[in-house]
Amino acid sequence: MLKYTVILVPEEEGGYSVEVPALPGCYTQGETREEAIAMAKEAIELYLESCKAHSEPIPEESGVESLVVEVKEPVA
């Protein structure tokens, strides 16, 4: 079983966009968080199938780390 980090970004108009940093060009979207996660799994599986079909190496998880940093608000 392979594991990959996915980044879910809520969109202003609704829904979520999804990026898989370890897989260049692997993006998808979903109307709900659950749908976005399901679409991410499908996109990853298709990406890996394409790698295998083209005899390309399966990319490993890139070790992306997610942090929240605190910054000062700009003074008007």
Image: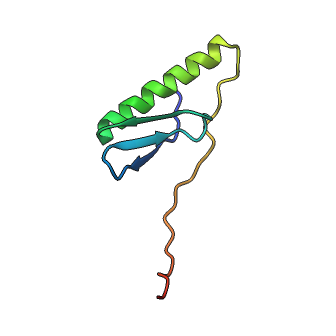
Residue 54 placement: quadrant = top right
Between 45 and 9, the residue placed more toward the observer is 9
Rendering coords of residue 71 (x, y %): 51, 77
Between 7 and 63, the residue placed more toward the observer is 7
Rendering coords of residue 12 (x, y %): 35, 53
Q: Residue at x 39, y 30 (%)?
A: 39
Q: Residue furthest top?
A: 53
Q: Residue at x 40, y 36 (%)?
A: 29
Q: Residue at x 58, y 41 (%)?
A: 21
Name the colour scheme.
Answer: rainbow
Residue 68 to residue 1: above or below: below
Judged left or right of residue 66, residue 17 is left
Judged left or right of residue 7, residue 34 is left
Judged left or right of residue 73, residue 24 is right
Q: Residue at x 64, y 19 (%)?
A: 51
Rendering coords of residue 35 (x, y %): 32, 34
Circle count: 0
